[in-house]
Image (spheres, rainbow, N blue to C red):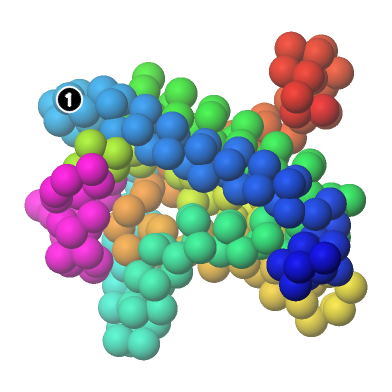
Amino acid sequence: MSAVTAAGRRYLPRGWTDFGRQLVIWFGFLLAYQGVRGLADRNPSKAFDNGWRVLGMEQGMTHHIFELTLQRVAESSSFLNRLASLTYWMSEFAVVGLALLYVYLRRHESFKRFRNWILIANVLGLVGYVLLPTAPPRMFQSLGFIDTLGGMNSMNHGSGFVQVAANPYAAMPSLHAADALIVGVMLITVTRRRWLRLLWALWPLWVWFCVMATANHFWLDVVAGVAVALLALALLQSHRFLRLVPKLA
Protein backbone atom coordinates (compact mmCIF):
# COMPACT_ATOMS: atom_id res chain seq x y z
CA MET A 1 0.00 0.00 0.00
CA SER A 2 1.49 3.35 -1.10
CA ALA A 3 1.94 6.32 1.22
CA VAL A 4 -0.68 8.28 -0.76
CA THR A 5 -3.26 5.51 -0.36
CA ALA A 6 -2.46 5.20 3.33
CA ALA A 7 -2.84 8.95 3.81
CA GLY A 8 -6.22 8.85 2.08
CA ARG A 9 -7.46 6.09 4.34
CA ARG A 10 -6.18 7.89 7.41
CA TYR A 11 -7.31 11.46 6.77
CA LEU A 12 -10.13 11.28 4.21
CA PRO A 13 -13.51 10.07 5.52
CA ARG A 14 -14.32 8.15 2.33
CA GLY A 15 -10.97 7.86 0.64
CA TRP A 16 -9.47 9.53 -2.40
CA THR A 17 -12.28 8.53 -4.78
CA ASP A 18 -14.99 10.40 -2.92
CA PHE A 19 -12.66 13.34 -2.24
CA GLY A 20 -11.90 13.58 -5.95
CA ARG A 21 -15.62 13.41 -6.72
CA GLN A 22 -16.32 16.33 -4.38
CA LEU A 23 -13.56 18.38 -5.99
CA VAL A 24 -15.03 17.71 -9.43
CA ILE A 25 -18.51 18.72 -8.21
CA TRP A 26 -17.25 21.91 -6.58
CA PHE A 27 -14.83 23.16 -9.20
CA GLY A 28 -17.11 22.04 -12.01
CA PHE A 29 -19.90 24.05 -10.46
CA LEU A 30 -17.65 27.09 -10.04
CA LEU A 31 -16.57 26.91 -13.67
CA ALA A 32 -20.11 26.54 -14.98
CA TYR A 33 -21.43 29.17 -12.58
CA GLN A 34 -18.85 31.78 -13.57
CA GLY A 35 -19.38 31.08 -17.26
CA VAL A 36 -23.17 31.41 -17.09
CA ARG A 37 -22.88 34.42 -14.80
CA GLY A 38 -20.60 36.11 -17.29
CA LEU A 39 -23.07 35.48 -20.09
CA ALA A 40 -25.97 36.93 -18.10
CA ASP A 41 -27.54 40.18 -19.23
CA ARG A 42 -24.85 42.88 -19.21
CA ASN A 43 -26.94 45.71 -20.58
CA PRO A 44 -25.38 48.69 -18.74
CA SER A 45 -28.40 50.95 -19.12
CA LYS A 46 -30.70 48.30 -17.64
CA ALA A 47 -28.23 47.59 -14.85
CA PHE A 48 -27.99 51.28 -13.96
CA ASP A 49 -31.76 51.69 -14.13
CA ASN A 50 -32.11 48.82 -11.67
CA GLY A 51 -29.40 50.34 -9.47
CA TRP A 52 -31.30 53.64 -9.35
CA ARG A 53 -34.48 51.73 -8.50
CA VAL A 54 -32.73 50.03 -5.58
CA LEU A 55 -31.48 53.41 -4.37
CA GLY A 56 -34.96 54.87 -4.75
CA MET A 57 -36.51 52.06 -2.72
CA GLU A 58 -33.92 52.44 0.02
CA GLN A 59 -34.39 56.20 0.26
CA GLY A 60 -38.13 55.78 0.18
CA MET A 61 -37.89 53.54 3.24
CA THR A 62 -35.10 55.23 5.20
CA HIS A 63 -34.51 58.68 3.61
CA HIS A 64 -30.79 57.99 3.93
CA ILE A 65 -28.00 56.29 1.95
CA PHE A 66 -26.57 54.07 4.68
CA GLU A 67 -23.92 52.60 2.38
CA LEU A 68 -22.22 56.00 2.17
CA THR A 69 -22.13 56.19 5.95
CA LEU A 70 -20.58 52.73 6.22
CA GLN A 71 -18.01 53.61 3.59
CA ARG A 72 -17.01 56.71 5.54
CA VAL A 73 -16.60 54.56 8.66
CA ALA A 74 -14.28 52.18 6.81
CA GLU A 75 -12.30 55.05 5.34
CA SER A 76 -11.69 56.52 8.77
CA SER A 77 -9.00 53.88 9.29
CA SER A 78 -6.57 52.62 6.67
CA PHE A 79 -6.39 49.28 8.50
CA LEU A 80 -10.17 48.91 8.59
CA ASN A 81 -10.43 49.90 4.94
CA ARG A 82 -7.83 47.33 3.87
CA LEU A 83 -9.38 44.64 6.06
CA ALA A 84 -12.82 45.31 4.57
CA SER A 85 -11.40 45.06 1.03
CA LEU A 86 -9.53 41.85 1.85
CA THR A 87 -12.67 40.37 3.40
CA TYR A 88 -14.67 41.21 0.28
CA TRP A 89 -12.23 39.34 -1.97
CA MET A 90 -11.56 36.39 0.34
CA SER A 91 -14.99 35.70 1.85
CA GLU A 92 -16.72 34.39 -1.25
CA PHE A 93 -14.45 31.62 -2.54
CA ALA A 94 -11.46 31.27 -0.21
CA VAL A 95 -13.38 31.18 3.07
CA VAL A 96 -16.27 29.16 1.62
CA GLY A 97 -13.83 26.65 0.09
CA LEU A 98 -11.81 26.28 3.29
CA ALA A 99 -15.00 25.93 5.35
CA LEU A 100 -16.23 23.17 3.04
CA LEU A 101 -12.87 21.43 3.29
CA TYR A 102 -12.88 21.63 7.08
CA VAL A 103 -16.40 20.23 7.37
CA TYR A 104 -15.58 17.49 4.88
CA LEU A 105 -12.52 16.37 6.83
CA ARG A 106 -13.61 16.95 10.42
CA ARG A 107 -17.43 16.97 10.48
CA HIS A 108 -18.19 14.82 7.48
CA GLU A 109 -21.74 13.98 8.56
CA SER A 110 -22.67 17.64 7.96
CA PHE A 111 -20.79 18.07 4.68
CA LYS A 112 -23.46 17.11 2.14
CA ARG A 113 -26.01 19.44 3.71
CA PHE A 114 -23.48 22.27 3.78
CA ARG A 115 -22.43 21.72 0.16
CA ASN A 116 -25.98 21.46 -1.12
CA TRP A 117 -27.07 24.58 0.73
CA ILE A 118 -24.24 26.56 -0.88
CA LEU A 119 -24.95 25.14 -4.34
CA ILE A 120 -28.69 25.82 -4.24
CA ALA A 121 -28.24 29.37 -2.93
CA ASN A 122 -25.74 30.21 -5.65
CA VAL A 123 -27.96 28.83 -8.40
CA LEU A 124 -30.83 30.98 -7.09
CA GLY A 125 -28.49 33.97 -7.04
CA LEU A 126 -27.54 33.34 -10.63
CA VAL A 127 -31.21 33.48 -11.59
CA GLY A 128 -31.34 36.87 -9.89
CA TYR A 129 -28.36 38.12 -11.90
CA VAL A 130 -30.00 37.06 -15.15
CA LEU A 131 -33.40 38.58 -14.33
CA LEU A 132 -32.21 41.67 -12.49
CA PRO A 133 -28.77 42.91 -13.54
CA THR A 134 -27.91 45.69 -11.11
CA ALA A 135 -25.03 48.16 -10.99
CA PRO A 136 -23.25 48.20 -7.60
CA PRO A 137 -22.87 51.36 -5.51
CA ARG A 138 -19.24 51.89 -6.61
CA MET A 139 -20.56 52.76 -10.08
CA PHE A 140 -22.56 55.68 -8.67
CA GLN A 141 -19.62 57.92 -7.92
CA SER A 142 -21.73 61.02 -8.56
CA LEU A 143 -23.43 60.27 -5.23
CA GLY A 144 -20.10 60.19 -3.40
CA PHE A 145 -19.31 56.48 -3.55
CA ILE A 146 -15.66 55.54 -3.90
CA ASP A 147 -14.35 52.39 -5.54
CA THR A 148 -12.22 51.42 -2.55
CA LEU A 149 -10.91 48.33 -4.36
CA GLY A 150 -9.51 50.58 -7.07
CA GLY A 151 -7.53 48.69 -9.67
CA MET A 152 -8.49 45.34 -8.17
CA ASN A 153 -11.95 45.66 -9.69
CA SER A 154 -10.48 46.57 -13.07
CA MET A 155 -8.02 43.71 -12.84
CA ASN A 156 -10.76 41.22 -12.05
CA HIS A 157 -13.16 42.41 -14.74
CA GLY A 158 -10.84 43.58 -17.43
CA SER A 159 -9.29 40.86 -19.54
CA GLY A 160 -9.23 37.30 -20.78
CA PHE A 161 -11.48 34.59 -19.39
CA VAL A 162 -12.17 36.71 -16.29
CA GLN A 163 -13.80 39.32 -18.53
CA VAL A 164 -16.13 36.61 -19.87
CA ALA A 165 -16.82 34.94 -16.54
CA ALA A 166 -17.12 37.96 -14.25
CA ASN A 167 -20.26 40.06 -14.36
CA PRO A 168 -19.74 43.60 -13.03
CA TYR A 169 -23.51 44.03 -12.74
CA ALA A 170 -24.11 41.04 -10.44
CA ALA A 171 -25.08 43.03 -7.34
CA MET A 172 -28.64 41.77 -6.70
CA PRO A 173 -28.79 39.55 -4.71
CA SER A 174 -25.54 39.62 -2.73
CA LEU A 175 -24.14 36.10 -2.71
CA HIS A 176 -21.39 37.35 -0.44
CA ALA A 177 -24.17 37.95 2.09
CA ALA A 178 -25.87 34.63 1.41
CA ASP A 179 -22.72 32.53 1.59
CA ALA A 180 -21.47 34.31 4.73
CA LEU A 181 -24.75 33.48 6.47
CA ILE A 182 -24.59 29.83 5.38
CA VAL A 183 -20.95 29.48 6.46
CA GLY A 184 -21.66 31.16 9.79
CA VAL A 185 -24.69 28.99 10.58
CA MET A 186 -23.04 25.74 9.53
CA LEU A 187 -19.80 26.34 11.42
CA ILE A 188 -21.71 27.33 14.54
CA THR A 189 -23.46 23.95 14.42
CA VAL A 190 -20.25 21.92 13.95
CA THR A 191 -17.91 23.93 16.20
CA ARG A 192 -17.58 22.96 19.85
CA ARG A 193 -15.53 25.81 21.28
CA ARG A 194 -17.62 28.72 22.51
CA TRP A 195 -15.27 31.45 21.28
CA LEU A 196 -15.29 29.96 17.78
CA ARG A 197 -19.07 29.86 17.79
CA LEU A 198 -19.09 33.53 18.69
CA LEU A 199 -16.61 34.25 15.90
CA TRP A 200 -18.76 32.49 13.31
CA ALA A 201 -21.90 34.17 14.66
CA LEU A 202 -20.25 37.53 13.94
CA TRP A 203 -18.90 36.48 10.54
CA PRO A 204 -22.07 37.22 8.50
CA LEU A 205 -22.42 40.65 10.15
CA TRP A 206 -18.81 41.51 9.34
CA VAL A 207 -19.13 40.40 5.72
CA TRP A 208 -22.36 42.36 5.31
CA PHE A 209 -20.60 45.44 6.62
CA CYS A 210 -17.65 44.89 4.28
CA VAL A 211 -19.65 44.44 1.08
CA MET A 212 -21.44 47.73 1.74
CA ALA A 213 -18.40 49.61 3.07
CA THR A 214 -16.48 48.73 -0.11
CA ALA A 215 -19.41 50.00 -2.21
CA ASN A 216 -20.00 46.63 -3.85
CA HIS A 217 -23.55 46.06 -2.58
CA PHE A 218 -26.56 48.04 -1.42
CA TRP A 219 -28.19 46.97 1.81
CA LEU A 220 -31.19 45.75 -0.17
CA ASP A 221 -28.76 43.46 -2.06
CA VAL A 222 -27.71 42.08 1.33
CA VAL A 223 -31.32 41.57 2.39
CA ALA A 224 -31.99 39.76 -0.90
CA GLY A 225 -28.91 37.60 -0.30
CA VAL A 226 -30.20 36.60 3.13
CA ALA A 227 -33.57 35.77 1.56
CA VAL A 228 -31.82 33.60 -1.03
CA ALA A 229 -30.01 31.68 1.73
CA LEU A 230 -33.28 31.12 3.61
CA LEU A 231 -35.10 30.05 0.44
CA ALA A 232 -32.29 27.62 -0.38
CA LEU A 233 -32.58 26.15 3.13
CA ALA A 234 -36.34 25.75 2.70
CA LEU A 235 -35.81 23.96 -0.63
CA LEU A 236 -33.18 21.74 0.95
CA GLN A 237 -35.75 20.66 3.52
CA SER A 238 -38.50 20.11 0.94
CA HIS A 239 -39.04 16.45 0.10
CA ARG A 240 -40.81 17.44 -3.12
CA PHE A 241 -37.79 19.46 -4.25
CA LEU A 242 -35.39 16.65 -3.33
CA ARG A 243 -37.40 14.21 -5.41
CA LEU A 244 -36.81 16.49 -8.42
CA VAL A 245 -33.07 16.49 -7.79
CA PRO A 246 -32.45 13.15 -6.05
CA LYS A 247 -28.66 13.46 -6.25
CA LEU A 248 -28.82 16.27 -3.71
CA ALA A 249 -30.48 14.01 -1.15
The quadrant in which residue 242 appears is: top right
- Which residue is at a point 29% across and 39% down the rendered structure image? 165
**Residue 246 or residue 47, whichever sits in front:** 246
**The furthest residue to the front:** 1
Question: What type is the residue that disc 1 sits on?
Answer: Asn
- Is 199 placed left or right of 73 in the picture? right
User: Which quarter of the figure is the C terminus placed in?
Assistant: top right
Q: Is residue 94 magenta?
A: no
- Which residue is at a point 47% across and 41% down the rendered structure image? 30
- Is 111 placed left or right of 36 in the picture? right
**Residue 26 or residue 14, whichever sits in front:** 14
Which residues are drawn in magenta?
134-162
- Which residue is at a point 35% across and 33% down the rendered structure image? 35
Residue denoted by label 1: 43
The quadrant in which residue 185 appears is: bottom right
Q: Is residue 142 magenta?
A: yes
- Element carrying mark 1: loop
Q: Position of residue 224 (x, y in %)?
A: 52, 37
The quadrant in which residue 141 appears is: bottom left
Q: Position of residue 11 (x, y in %)?
A: 81, 68
